[in-house]
Each structure stands twice: as structure tokens, then as C-alpha cells.
Amino acid sequence: MVETAEWSEQDLAEFMACVRAELGIKMPAGKALMLQSRILRRLRQLNLDSLEAYRERLFASPHADEERIHFLDLVTT
């Protein structure tokens, strides 16, 4: 299972950019830990073992549109 320590600033920036592009919400750097924990919870729900597998599902898979809805819900609630 992917751990928080395996995340780079670039990883977080990519997810934060998605939030900004989709919702117009600029996430401050102080929200990075919250974002990490919520994405990790989603990885566990999906039984994914890497951040790359989640990135693929969110941005490039046939399920991307559906997953983007889940992603945006988890970051905004």
C-alpha cells in the first residue's frame, strides 16, 4: 500500500491542479496532508496499491469521468 512518504510535491501539485481546473478552487499548501489522507482512503477503497494506479484511474482510464466525481467529492467534503 502506498504511504504518505512516497508522495512528491509534484504528485500533490497534480491533484491540486485537478481540483483547481475542475472546480476553480485553489488548494493551499496547508491542505496537502488532508488531500493525501483522503486519496489514501480512496486507494484503500479501490484496493489499489500505488499512487500511479490511482493517477491512471483518475486521469486516463475508461473510469476517469466517474472517478473524477469521487475525487472531487472527497476533497470538498
Image: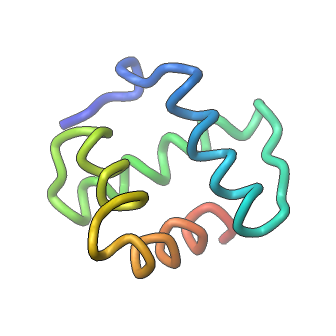
Residue at x 73%, y 59% (from the top left corner)? 21
Residue 62 appears at what percent x and percent y? 27, 74
Q: Is residue 33 left or right of residue 20?
A: left
Residue 51: x %, y % from top left: 31, 39
**In the image shown, does 32 or 8 lie closer to the viewer?**
8
| Quadrant housing residue 41 | bottom left
* Residue in the image at 58% along x and 74% along y: 73
Quadrant assignment, res 19: bottom right
Task: Give the quadrant of the N terminus.
Answer: top left
Q: In the image, is residue 8 above or below residue 53?
A: above
Question: What quarter of the picture does the C terminus occupy?
Answer: bottom right
Displayed quadrant of residue 57: bottom left
20 to 77, vertically: above or below = above
Q: Position of residue 6 (x, y in %)?
A: 35, 20
By what rule are the colours in the image chosen?
A: rainbow
Q: Write the residue at 40% across / 27% down.
A: 4
Image-based side of 33 in relation to 6, left or right: right
Q: How many marks?
A: 0
Name the residue located 22 percent from the left edge and 64 percent from the top edge: 46
Compared with 57, 30 (above or below) is above
